[in-house]
Image (cartoon, rainbow, N blue to C red):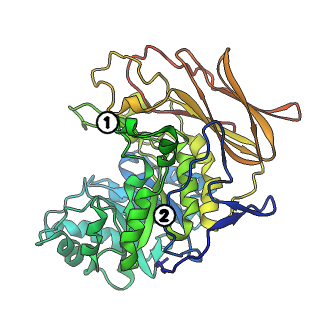
Amino acid sequence: MQAVFVVLLSLLFFVDVCRSGPIGNRFAHRHIGHGIASTSSLPLSRSNSNSTKYVVAHFMVGNSYPYTQQDWLSDIRLAFQNGIDGFALNVGQDSWQPQQVANAYQAASQSGTGFKLFLSFDMTSLPCSSANDAATLRNYITTYASHPNQLICNGRVFASTFSGESCQFGQSSVKSGWSTQFLQQLSGQSAVYFLPSFFIDTSGFQSFTGVINGMFNWNSGWPTQVTAATIADYTASALSSVVGGTTTDEQYINALQPMGGSYMAAVSPWFFTHYSPQTYNKNWIYLSDDHLYANRWEYLIGIRNQVDIVQIVSWNDFGESHYIGPIEGAQPNSQAWVNGFNHTGWLNMTSYYATAFKTGTYPCISNDQIVMWSRPHPALASAPDPVGRPNNYQITSDKIWAVVLATSPATVTLSTSPTQSQTFNVPAGASKLSLPISAGGFMKAVLQRNSQTIIDLEPQGFYFNPSPSSYNYNALVVSST
């Protein structure tokens, strides 16, 4: 997985094994009604096409308090069935979390799938002010270094973080802290291959030479630069190219290139969090419109030679509404906007994109599928909610979104009211559709072929509520499978 840098003299194409001839990376996928967003001008300076690619999902161990080993086993099998190779285990300071990590590793072994695990140290939770604090991290590494399901990279134990860019572990600098108290004390089979998510400018990567082996770009999963203050600066076409785009990937890849560093990118379907100042004081959205999950995957597939690992954010982070796994375990007081809002439809379409990323070839679609989602109320709705509207609520559109995976050409009709519908002709492969929805609306999708109805998808009880009792900018995701 160690990056090798060469100059590519030609564009990357993928061969669709279901049809003859090459297909361009993003351009093989129809984005009907919105045009096709162009890729960024990222120079293809790294070539890693022959190395193993991984797709992993971020798993919040802090939300697993009631998990049994059977719960872990069910999640691992479900993830593996949907093209996910492993979990990044986000661990914090709770005293019960080491036992759940042990359960996860045991379940991975029991699964018989070869499913991989690695530690992602949450440095917003774990203390790191003294040398003794690093012992917790080292103990995790040495405990699982030789476990058959531990992800190994270049013969070393793969490890990551969430944050940690200010951790000194009692030393004179952050670099010295991580180097002397963590990495240098782990050798032999416990030596670490370290790809943290440090929230620093890419110009600072060089200062961690000898410490990091690459970097995880957590915020690449969302167009975080689009806010209520900046959205007016974007035309519709420019906005479409930003959603899922590779601008920050380019910055990370170019900064890591002189170091020979590996690159881990993020992909995420959504972001909404709604905590009051009296709790976690987090109340905002990131722009998740324009088929964020599918678009982001397609951009990453287009630059797969430069990306070693894709990390899905997340499997079960309910508090930020970007979970693709089942709603289970212990929620971090997010029930008000999570309960009843299933996201496993996004999981169902993950294998299609994960396979293309790992192999360079989009797989044949053997069964027609529609994944469809919407928020539960208009963006400008008013609610008697003491937490208030989330920051950036103005940037999201009142639409239903759908991804169609079709075995062969068909027609798909989306409807949001008795008088609001549109029929689309879709080709074989993936198509991205949308339709405006108004107060009182519903969401419905029908796929037909040769005058026969193949899919009739309509979630019962969904109502685009003009008068919600509280603000909820989460999505309800439904799938035909």
Near mark 2 (Cα within 10 A), the count class, few <14, some 14-19 or many ≥20, is: some
Q: How many marks?
A: 2
Quarter placement of the C terminus? top right
Using the image as rendered, state which of residue 448 and residue 420 is in the foreground: 420
Residue designated by label 2: 42
Give percent across and percent down for residue 177: 18, 72
Tell me what residue is drawn at x 27 percent, y 21 percent. 386
Give percent across and percent down for residue 59: 43, 53
As helix, strand or loop, the secondary structure at mark 2 comes to: loop
Q: Amino acid at mark 2?
A: Leu
Tell me the tag on residue 385.
Answer: none
Q: Amino acid at mark 1?
A: Ala
Instruction: For marks 1 and 2, give the CA distance.
Output: 27 Å
Q: Are marks 1 and 2 in contact (CB under 8 Å)?
A: no
Mark closest to the chain's N terminus, 1 or 2 = 2
Res. 43 visible in picture? yes
Near mark 1 (Cα within 10 A), the count class, few <14, some 14-19 or many ≥20, is: few
Give percent across and percent down for residue 399: 55, 28
Q: Quadrant of residue 110?
A: bottom right
Residue designated by label 1: 229
Say left or right for 173 vs 41: left
